[in-house]
């Protein structure tokens, strides 16, 4: 299959090569980490001074590499002291005690290591503990809108944006007919099931599997809403199932560690401090999220576009939090270095009441950082309303701010 390059990730990887730092590509299963690694392999292999040692633990040809000892034997048999050796391992967490091996090779002269993994807890805790922090994580996301257009040979249009909102950005959809919604939904559900089974159920020996699946559906129905462990327990009681708040919090952490959902903390804008309860949750991919709710898109479109805006902000390099004022919430407080912006998301700004709700909340913030409202209001052009910029979702996804 042709590899469509995602240059931003290759550029990030190259920043850390040659610095005795292990580069770890993280992210949910099937967001394209393997193809980023294959693209890197293809690029490195063009230089005769490079020796590329590649392992893909999801392929049976490498099934016998089960432990760090097996990994050492495989690498030792292929390493070349006369060249720069690049050790590339896909789904490294499938190798028992892998961290022992990569720790030893990291300090070898002329050796670079890039690995992928699908579980934040395994990678962060094991590598940080045994390597003393000498690794750099490159978070690979589901396709942004511009990559979605490129992968599916589409032009930017309202119709293309609508399709993106409906099916999401899993790269594997390139092999499917986007017009066959049943096929698309089946693929997205298969990806979710694989992630839940491999990265949560088997890894953590989950016994209450039905609660895990119900929790995913709950988070899908409540995307962008404040969620607490108490509200989850109440929801489960309504389904005749008793679940403790501790179990709810534990399962949510598992979902976050598998990159299926993202927890977004609340930030007190006036007091400039983090709040400790009631976070919001967004899905890594809206296509997966859409399969988990029975509500029609016309009834939850605002949740979906808020999820898309969140993921694009992360893609653009922002740290994202939910803002709180005494008089209400700000959808996103976004920081990058010392800069900050505020963002409100709305489906349509169709009347004065909606305009006042979205723009009024931003006017209550008494600082000079840029403020934006993003909507799908028909025919909206970039406008300035007393210092608050209103722009269309399409323009934001294509051009940014």
Image: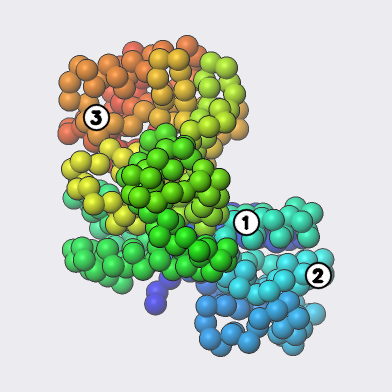
Q: Is residue 84 left or right of residue 63?
A: right
Q: What is the spatial separation of the Cα atoms under label 1 and label 2, in whole angstroms? A: 21 Å
Q: Nearer the viewer, mark 3 or mark 2?
A: 2
115 up-or-down from 53: above or below: above
Q: Position of residue 353 (x, y in %)?
A: 22, 17
Q: Position of residue 297 (x, y in %)?
A: 21, 46
Read off the residue under disc 3. Answer: 381
Disc nearer the start of the sequence (1/2) = 2
Please identify the quarter of the rendering in which residue 182 is found. Answer: bottom left
Q: Secondary structure at mark 2?
A: helix
Q: Is residue 260 left or right of residue 106?
A: left
Q: Are marks 3 and 2 in contact (CB under 8 Å)?
A: no
Residue visible at 65% across and 60% down in the picture = 123
Q: Is residue 267 left or right of residue 72?
A: left
Q: Secondary structure at mark 1?
A: helix
Label count reads: 3
Read off the residue under disc 2. Answer: 104
Residue 121: numbered disc: 1
């Amino acid at each position: 299959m042709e590899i469509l390059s995602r240059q931003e990730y290759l550029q990030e990887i190259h920043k850390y090569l040659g610095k005795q730092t292990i580069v770890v590509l993280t992210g949910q299963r099937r967001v394209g980490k393997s193809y980023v690694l294959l693209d890197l392999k293809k690029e490195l292999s063009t230089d005769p001074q490079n020796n590329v040692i590649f392992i893909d633990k999801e392929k049976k040809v490498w099934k016998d590499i089960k432990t760090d000892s097996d990994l050492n034997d495989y690498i030792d048999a292929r390493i070349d002291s006369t060249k720069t050796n690049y050790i590339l391992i896909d789904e490294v967490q499938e190798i028992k005690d892998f961290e022992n091996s990569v720790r030893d090779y990291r300090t070898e002269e002329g050796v670079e290591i890039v690995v992928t993994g699908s579980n934040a807890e395994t990678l962060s805790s094991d590598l940080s503990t045994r390597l003393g922090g000498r690794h750099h994580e490159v978070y690979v996301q589901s396709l942004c809108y511009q990559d979605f257009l490129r992968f599916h040979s589409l032009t930017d249009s309202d119709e293309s944006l609508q399709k993106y909102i409906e099916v999401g950005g899993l790269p594997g959809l390139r092999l499917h007919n986007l017009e066959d919604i049943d096929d698309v939904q089946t693929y997205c559900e298969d990806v979710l099931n694989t992630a839940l089974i491999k990265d949560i159920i088997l890894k953590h020996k989950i016994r209450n599997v039905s609660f895990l699946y119900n929790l995913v559906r709950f988070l899908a129905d409540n995307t962008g809403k404040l969620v607490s462990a108490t509200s989850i327990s109440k929801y489960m009681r309504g389904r005749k199932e008793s679940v403790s708040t501790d179990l709810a919090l534990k399962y949510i952490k598992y979902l976050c560690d598998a990159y299926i959902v993202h927890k977004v903390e609340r930030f007190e804008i006036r007091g400039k401090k983090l709040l400790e309860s009631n976070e919001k949750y967004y899905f890594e991919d809206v296509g997966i999220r859409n399969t988990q709710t029975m509500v029609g898109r016309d009834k939850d479109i605002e949740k979906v576009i808020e999820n898309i805006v969140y993921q694009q902000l992360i893609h653009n390099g922002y740290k994202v939090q939910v803002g709180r004022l005494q008089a209400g919430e700000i959808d996103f407080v976004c920081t990058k270095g010392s800069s900050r912006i505020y963002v409100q998301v709305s489906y349509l700004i169709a009347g004065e009441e909606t305009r006042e709700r979205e723009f009024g909340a931003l006017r209550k913030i008494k600082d000079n950082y840029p403020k934006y409202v993003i909507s799908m209001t028909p025919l909206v052009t970039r406008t300035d309303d007393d210092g608050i910029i209103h722009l269309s979702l399409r323009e934001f996804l294509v051009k940014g701010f």
